[in-house]
Image (spheres, rainbow, N blue to C red):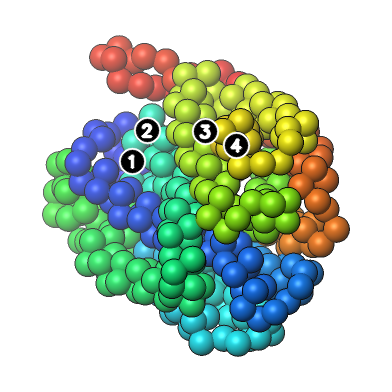
Amino acid sequence: MKTVDVGVMLDEGPWRGYQKLLVFVTALAIVLDGVDNQLLSVAIPAMMRDWQIPTRAPFTHVVAIGLVGMMMGGAIAGVLGDRYGRRKALLGSVFVFGLLTTTIVFVNNIWALAALRFLSGLGLGGAMPNAAALASEYVPRRHRPMAVTLTIVCVPFGGFVAGLVGARLLPTWGWRTLFGVGGTLPLVLGFVLMAALAESPRFMARHRERWSELVQLLRKLGHSVPNDAEFVDPTESTRSSSVSELLVPEFRRDTMALCASFFFCLFAAYASVFWLPSMLAGVGFDVASSSNGLAAWNLGGVVGALLGAAIIVRVGSRATMIAMCIGAIAGALAVRQVTPAPTLAMFLLLGWTGGLINGVQTTMYALAAHVYPATIRATGVGTAVAFGRIGGVVSGYAGLSSGLTGLFALLAGFMAIVAVTLGAVRRHIPKMVAGPEGAGQYARARV
């Protein structure tokens, strides 16, 4: 019987088509997560008119309780993913948020909407930590930051899609059609994922009864593995799946810094995406222009996250992410100085600021996945994101009293705090250096 170190095999192995397919289908789930997450912000102005609600104040409770659901879903699904498998947890999350989003088609009052947003939030929050863990564990270490970022960047990309679709569907078909389409697509994707998505190889390595399945998966990933292989993962298998493990001396400082970073960054991210369309409408933008403003914000997020991940590989995450925070602060302050109107300058500033805030947010998932070993990775990411959801819950009330300029003042202040807390993380992703044969390897020095 041959002993196989699955950690070394995955970390130093090839980056082939099948792994790219696995990351792609994982990312599809997060695209639709992002769509369903931001459908409400697109639909609020239309709902206000339909239900004859004069202000957005009642929707603050809907936004807040939806984020409570996402907070709980992220924490619960992270632990479930570590204990029972990332694939099962991700599939369950997709079916939950797809079904509950579809049901919103039938609501006729604020409180029914709030209840369904809470329940759909359980699925929306549960998808991301398991998707991040899966993406990080399919691929070699040198490609991990980009793979995780490509997965999580699908949240703002989904928001971009929601903004574009909303601008076209809302004027003609109304908000109920928007939720019907947004909820049906994840249900269809869920059945596709059941056929196409593989379980995490590191997870299967810890369960002897799944070793035969692991052998077949590793062969698909391009590795030569005998049928009677015995798997070990000494660098990852020393921790149990428990939230308490995140606070042992080895991880305590990074856990606290990550939780603070997620709190303030997700406050900024959710305050903007949930309230930007209605605030733009409040200063004179029509429905289509308000939705396009959200689309510009999220499109900038896609570009910012991809550029951020590419730069991280070359210079490391600490300098890259702090610089992105500083750029976001400058953009938020600049928006406050521009006359609010649907002009090219306004859309470019929204794209710049949204790009950097979302870029920091999405690359934080890659950072969290790097900080924790596989046995507590989904728990670690899920816990950090759960603290971020608390910030998101608080952000739901930022739209109650803040105007457009007040909102961007908050964004600037909170991104300054994010820069400080990210600087406190010890286990930042180091830069890559060229190996003997041109393959990327991590620099040993901490950055």
Q: Residues within 10 Å of mark 1 (few under 14, many from 20)?
A: many
Q: CA distance from mark 4 to mark 2?
A: 39 Å
Q: CA distance from mark 1 to mark 4?
A: 42 Å
Lower position in the chain sequence, tag 1 or tag 4: 1
| Between marks 4 and 2 in the image, the one whose residue lies nearer the viewer | 4
Percent of width and height locating residue 98: 43, 73
Q: CA distance from mark 3 to mark 2?
A: 18 Å
Position above or below: 420 against 291: above
Question: Is 106 displayed left or right of 326 in the figure?
Answer: left
Determine which residue is flagged by label 2: 143
Name the one closer to the observer, 417 or 374: 417
Determine which residue is flagged by label 1: 139
Lower position in the chain sequence, tag 4 or tag 2: 2
Determine which residue is flagged by label 4: 343
Determine which residue is flagged by label 3: 304
- Quadrant in the picture for residue 197: bottom left
Q: Amino acid at mark 4?
A: Thr
Element type at mark 1? loop
